[in-house]
Amino acid sequence: MSLLGLLALLLLFLLYRAPSYTRVQAHAQDFPPGFPGREGEGQVRVELASPLPVFFRLEALPSAPLGLVPRALSGVAWGRSQRTLALPYAYRRRGLHPVRLSFGLQSPLGFGKRVLVLEAGQVLVYPALRALPPYRPAPSLFLEGRAAAFGLPDPLEAKGLRPFTPGDTPRLLARKASTRLGYPVVREVEKSLQGSLFLHIDTQSLHPGYLDHAASLATWLLLQAEARGERFGLSAGEVLPLGRGKAHLNRALTLLARLAPTPGPALPPPAPWGSTYLLLTQGAEDAFLKAALLGARQARKGVLLLLPEGYFLFPGEKGRPARGRTPGLLRALGLKAVLAAHGLELRVVRGNEPLRL
């Protein structure tokens, strides 16, 4: 065989193997964290590197939790190139969900196909946000002021003026009043007995809807605490200590979004000193109840919220009658007096009842 024939065979072989030589990377962007119901348009950027010409077909796989529908893009790649595929989304379900792509490659000769399934990234969807009855933690034992941006008090909370004393920060100076009076004065901020909330979620799930209901309830409580400027903490797979602020709230929402069931009970940690200790559980196992009794020692107030069926009625919902008593309910009722003696109030919300706090 002549050299020209060998070169022709080599070229055919390389074209046949072209899909195997192609390198693909995919990156999802513009998919911000959000609550169910959020809509928008994200993008998937695909980077291709192919030493030989190759046909490709990029297809976004559907995702029910993210509201993604199939969308495709076809073309020819040779060398280094980028392609962008727009993906409208409509968040529907809590969790950390992947954005997956199907990438098909084919030789220019019409054979030598190769199909890749790529994960372009993950999107965080917060728990469903539904209005629930308000709940305020027990007042703290110490006076404290409401937090504000940059550590400055809210001028609307000032109850009066007083002379400047050594140790006062210059940021509190009331300049106009100091100029009028002829000596430095500072704003004095009204302080209040502001409570703190520490919430623990038992991740042992005996009903598929339990964790979603618990996460929605926790989201509502933490958002209300943040709006009032109260400190809050969360135990949901990981322990988030007491804090406040938007960054702290985002960390808590991330934990709730990623909340996953466990085969056994998640034992509550000790309550921060002087906090309202709110525990959510469905199973109320013996180990959980014992840990709750120990953890409530430092709490200002303790509440054990039991959801025997794993869910409750949101406003506007109607449920079927809940008949009989679950093992968890019987265990908790049997220890109701012991729980009360240790500062834990038992509150039971059956599946046919609206939430009461």
Image: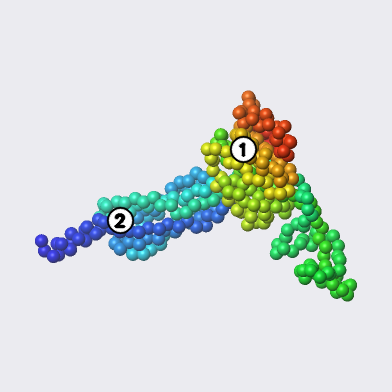
Residue 288: mark: 1
Residue 114: x and y in percent read 31, 51
Q: Residue at x 50, y 48 (%)?
A: 97
Q: Quadrant of residue 329?
A: top right
Q: Residue at x 20, y 61 (%)?
A: 10
Residue at the farthest right position: 181
Q: Is residue 68 left or right of residue 118?
A: right
Q: Is residue 315 visible?
A: no
- SS for callout 1: helix
Q: Quadrant of residue 357?
A: top right
- SS for callout 2: helix
Residue at the farthest top position: 324
Which one is in front, 87 or 153? 153
Residue 124: x and y in percent read 54, 51
Which one is in front, 338 or 186? 338
Q: Residues within 10 Å of mark 1 (few under 14, many from 20)?
A: some
Which one is in front, 328 or 32? 328
The residue at which mark 2 appears reads as 19
Q: Quadrant of the N terminus?
A: bottom left
Residue 135: x and y in percent read 72, 43
Residue 325: x and y in percent read 63, 26
Q: Residue at x 52, y 48 (%)?
A: 96
Residue 172: mark: none
Under mark 2, the amino acid is: Pro
Q: Quadrant of residue 120?
A: bottom left
Q: Earlier in the sequence, mark 1 or mark 2?
A: 2
Under mark 1, the amino acid is: Phe
**How many discs mark residues in the rendered view?**
2
Q: Residue at x 21, y 58 (%)?
A: 12
